[in-house]
Amino acid sequence: MITGRRRLIEWRPSEAARAAHDTLTIEGFVLDGSDATFEEMGYAGLITVASGTGGHVRLVVRNNTLKNVLSSSRGLYIQGDVFGVAASNVFDRVGIALGIYGNDYDSWASYRQEYGTGNSFYFEDNTIRFSSDFSGQGHAGFITSGQGGRVVVRYNSWDYTNVSDPGEFWDVHGLQGANPWGGTTGCENYSSMMAEYYGNSIVNQNNAYRWMQHRGGWLLMFYNSLSGSTSPISWAMQYYCNACQAKGSFNQKADNSYYWRNLANGAESVFKVDNQPTSEPGVGCTGSDPIVLDVDVMNFSPAFDGSRGVGCGPLEARPPTCTPGAGYWATNQSCTDLRGMIGARPPSPIDGTLYRCASSGTWNAYYAPFTYPYPWSSPAAPQNVILR
């Protein structure tokens, strides 16, 4: 066990490490933050990996226990172009289980937006729990991404027993300013590039108000289950227009996103759209480039006819005609009963293909989940590892 009110494992890959795509494997540790605050953690995490531009590195975090960090403190903090997996870990009494961020403009300029590939960071088969009373001040087992980050969150189990105020659960950050509202140089905190959330289970939550806040980039969110005293809402929203970005002309708003079969206390959790018109500079895109439901983002449609939203069922039941952008999840698994497909190490991992309607009005296979479990290996030791 390593104990301390600070970062306990830190890796800042050198230029040579990034060019060689070095991998760091962290396995078998118990890391105890002793109720450290975000300030005491140096605004990072128990495990901190901060990588610069010019190449990516890989990270494997497996079979560890990370515990006792409060509020906005991270269990796992990742910054830069870092691919790999955090799997089969226990996060106990952790405010933010995972904060994952890219290198803003450089990440957007260097990588494609794409689903279903290994060029992301995977968070899978983890258990997030609270073994004693925990007041998260709005953050308890929270996951957040932004600044060009790419993340896949799948097959994890959250149990909110002993938490009085979980607040919200997941956040995919969009374009925003750092000063704090864009300052004089425009928005320099870029949007998450893409995120996938599927096969996750949340139980015993009390008084949460929000499940997902999708503020920018692409998102697939499907086959997740939540139960508790409330049925928290999910939002697709943006604070800043694309015109606010300091450099480049990327489409950073919530777009090309599909949400289906996310069950809150057994009922479909339907995303709402909010374009946040305000008086702040560069903020509010209602008049110029708003998020449009059934164009940019698609909700599940229980009586799907191919004209809008997302349908679910066997391939042979897919409607023969469709409107461009509509989606259909073709599967031989149930679309109503998620048992066996959610939570850590599910006996029946999710299997299917998302078809997307092309501009020609025809269906094309678009997405299938990446290999599960994540394929990892044990490479040579990396450079610049700091154990504190």
Image (cartoon, rainbow, N blue to C red):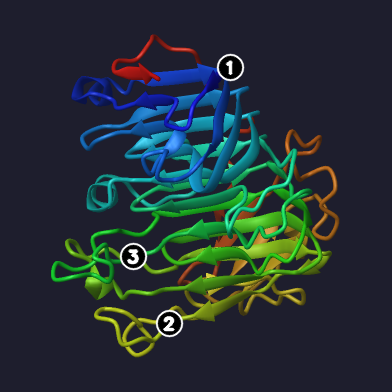
Decide: few, some or many residues near mark 3? Use Cα within 10 Å; few <14, some 14-19, many ≥20.
many
- Residue underneath mark 3: 175
> Is residue 274 at least partly visible in the picture?
yes
Compared with residue 75, is residue 224 higher up or lower down, i.e. above or below?
below
- What label sits on residue 133 in the rendered view? none
Query: Looking at the image, is mark 2 or mark 1 earlier in the sequence?
Result: 1
Label 2: element kind: loop
Q: Nearer the viewer, residue 172 or 372?
A: 172
Task: Please report contact status of discs 3 and 2: CB closer than 8 Å, yes or no.
Answer: no
Does residue 192 appear left or right of residue 74 in this picture? left
Seen at 34% across and 18% down, the residue is: 385
Q: Give how far across and how far down residue 4 sits, in percent.
A: 49, 27
Q: Residue furthest bottom?
A: 287
Query: Looking at the image, is mark 3 or mark 2 earlier in the sequence?
Result: 3
Label 3: element kind: loop
> Is residue 363 at least partly visible in the picture?
no
The Cα atoms of the two marked residues, 2 and 1, are separated by: 46 Å
Q: Give how far across and how far down residue 281 sits, in percent.
A: 24, 80
Decide: few, some or many residues near mark 1? Use Cα within 10 Å; few <14, some 14-19, many ≥20.
few
Compared with residue 242, is residue 143 higher up or lower down, i.e. above or below?
above
Q: Nearer the viewer, residue 86 or 91?
A: 91
Decide: few, some or many residues near mark 2? Use Cα within 10 Å; few <14, some 14-19, many ≥20.
some
User: Tag 3: residue type?
Assistant: Leu
Does residue 216 appear left or right of residue 226 in this picture? left
- Residue underneath mark 1: 1
Seen at 67% across and 60% down, the residue is: 165
State which mark lies toward you, 1 or 3. Answer: 1
Q: Residue furthest top?
A: 380
- What label sits on residue 276 in the rendered view? 2
Task: Please report contact status of discs 2 and 1: CB closer than 8 Å, yes or no.
Answer: no
The Cα atoms of the two marked residues, 3 and 2, are separated by: 13 Å
User: Tag 2: residue type?
Assistant: Gln
